[in-house]
Image: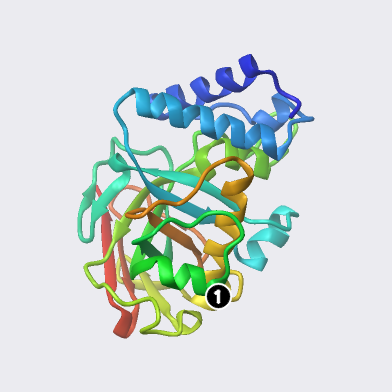
């Protein structure tokens, strides 16, 4: 790590204030050009404690940047992860207030709900054994950090995204529930419509070749920082489509075929 404990906490507080005030702060990778991923995850972890102190409850985890296309675009070779809190949950078909987010976007993915902990060096079989059920899901993204620095033009880096809780903002779960081995998740996909027009399609194989492998990666990543997934946790395994911008008045419908569907509206 290159940042002091004081700098980590200051960055965490700045991000939490930005979230509360629905505004964006400058890139942390510009303010701290030598910061590392360890610094970024430390900032994310510091926010976890502040959120808990404010009464929030952790309900799960998200995996991001799992597709090869997104990794190549950002010049990275690894996914990232973030934390899901209880106030991020929306029912399918709900309407998101226009006062909730700054620049909301949506991604389609498969969520895993666990019935047993996952920690450290696990295999695919361990993930399947620990999973209670899988479900169609939408992730709502938002960013409390500018997408690009106005002076230099430098775009957000993975350090900024991780610090900003992997741009996580909300989660929408379908009512459909399936045993984790009921479908070949590599072939589970979705047709995603925005205001009635198809804007994205994708398959589970776009997530590290198999969404199950996303949880294998996450268990190992979390172990590095002394964390683990617990029974009851919801885990977003990673998007297999590019983010869809959702300004006010947007209706999103994700049709997963036999796997189910999930919808969300933005006021």
The image quadrant where one finds the N terminus is: top right
* Pick the front one: 1 or 19: 1
Q: Residue at x 44, y 27 (%)?
A: 49
Quarter location, residue 257: bottom left
Q: Is residue 172 above or below residue 34?
A: below
In this figure, which residue is indicated by the disc labeled 1? 210
Of 143 and 182, the residue lying toward us: 182
Answer left or right for 88 relative to 158: left
Q: Is residue 8 visible?
A: yes
Q: Residue at x 79, y 30 (%)?
A: 34
Which residue occupies the foreground of this view, 173 or 20? 173
In the image, taking residue 11 as reference, residue 254 lies left or right, namely left
The residue drawn where x is 53% and y is 33% is 45
Q: Is residue 45 left or right of residue 148?
A: left
Q: Identify the secondary structure beneath mark 1.
A: loop
Q: Please report the residue visible at 61 percent of the width from the left and 27 percent of the height from the top.
A: 26
In the picture shown, does residue 122 fall above or below 186? above
């Amino acid at each position: 790590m290159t940042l002091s404990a004081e700098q980590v906490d200051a960055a965490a507080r700045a991000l939490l204030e930005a979230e509360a005030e629905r505004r964006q702060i400058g890139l942390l990778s510009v303010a701290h050009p030598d910061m590392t991923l360890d610094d970024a995850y430390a900032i994310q972890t510091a926010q976890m404690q502040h959120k808990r102190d404010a009464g929030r409850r952790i309900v799960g985890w998200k995996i991001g940047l799992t597709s090869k296309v997104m990794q190549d675009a950002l010049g990275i070779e690894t996914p990232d992860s973030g934390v899901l809190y209880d106030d991020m949950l929306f029912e399918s078909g709900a309407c998101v207030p226009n006062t909730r987010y700054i620049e909301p976007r949506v991604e389609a993915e498969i969520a895993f709900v666990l019935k047993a902990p996952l920690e450290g060096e696990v295999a695919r079989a361990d993930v399947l054994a620990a999973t209670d059920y899988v479900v169609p899901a939408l992730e709502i993204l938002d960013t409390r950090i500018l997408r690009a620095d106005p002076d230099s033009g430098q775009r957000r880096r993975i350090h900024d995204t991780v610090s900003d809780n992997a741009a996580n903002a909300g989660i929408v779960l379908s009512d459909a529930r399936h045993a984790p081995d009921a479908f070949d998740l590599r072939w589970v996909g979705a047709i995603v419509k925005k205001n009635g027009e198809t804007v994205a399609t994708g398959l589970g194989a776009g997530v590290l070749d198999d969404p199950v492998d996303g949880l294998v990666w996450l268990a190992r990543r979390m172990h590095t920082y002394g964390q683990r997934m617990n029974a009851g946790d919801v885990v977003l395994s990673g998007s297999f489509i590019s983010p869809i911008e959702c300004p006010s008045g947007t209706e999103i419908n994700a049709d997963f075929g036999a796997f189910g569907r999930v919808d969300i509206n933005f006021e």
